[in-house]
Amino acid sequence: MKRLLTIVLLFLCLLAAAGSDAYAFAGNPLLPYADIIIDVGHGGVDSGARYGKYQEKDMNLAISKKTYKLLQKKGYRVIINRTNDYALSQDNKWSYGGRHRKDLAQRSGIANTIKPKMMLSMHINWSGKPNRRGPLVFHQNRSESILFANLLQNSLNRVYGSKELPILGKKYYVLRNTKYPAVIVEFGFISNKTDRKLLNSSHHQAKLADAVARAVDEYFGMVNNSTFSR
């Protein structure tokens, strides 16, 4: 892990010198700390879920960038782990396994090095049932993650008019291997015609970013004076 910290810090230095925004940080780019890490699902050769010309990686990125800018404007210290069509597995020279495992390990590895108060992993869902639609939030089996998942699910339910409940994400690598509070949010179903149209709308993407920001405000408002605070 010390080696990973060195790699991350060196990478941030190189990006700052080169003017790259692959790891954008609202504040000192050399400071390995953040209130929130936005983990933009998939990227590069990994499209994620697909439907015709529509690709999950592009929807994830559009929503994530809007969320990043909004949270940054609110004064949070935020890191977003990609701002273009890029596979994080390309940066992973430290873990074993295939491309997919390296991609997931890189995401949790960055979080475990930077030690955020919360990591938000952004995704779009898919189902073999075309009528399935709406947002779903998955959480770790820890109090901070459960609290944020409930706040985020409620916030997104208000956007969609849905009544979903958050789900324990036992099977997800990122949730199992990230040592800090984290959730995975599925903003809707690319396999559903209505969701697909909404998820490709800049206006709807902005509404989703606002829903996330509201949940973040609620979460930090609740934990700042509680036993959750570090």
Image: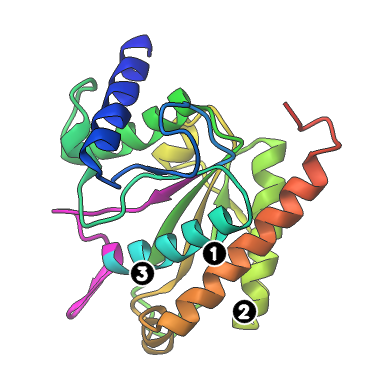
- Tell me which numbered mark, 3 or 2, is placed earlier along the sequence: 3
Q: Residues within 10 Å of mark 1 (few under 14, many from 20)?
A: many
Most extreme residue toward the top is 2
Q: Which residue is mark 3?
A: 126
Q: Nearer the N terminus, badge 1 or badge 2? A: 1
| Residue 219 in sight in this render | yes
**Residue at numbered disc 1:** 136
Q: Amino acid at mark 3?
A: Trp
Q: Which residue is mark 2?
A: 159
Rendered residue at 40%/78% (across/down): 199
- What type is the residue that disc 1 sits on? Leu
Q: Is residue 82 magenta?
A: no
- SS of the residue under disc 3: loop
Quarter of the image with the N terminus in it:
top left
Q: Position of residue 96 (x, y in %)?
A: 20, 23
- Percent from the top left, x then y, of residue 170? 51, 41
The span shown in magenta is 37-57
Q: Is residue 211 left or right of residue 225?
A: left
Q: Position of residue 228 (x, y in %)?
A: 77, 32
Name the residue: 47% across, 84% down.
203
Q: Is residue 124 above or below residue 84?
A: below
Depth check: 25 or 98 in front?
A: 25
Circles 1 and 2: CB atoms closer than 8 Å? no
- Indicate whether residue 40 is drawn in magenta: yes
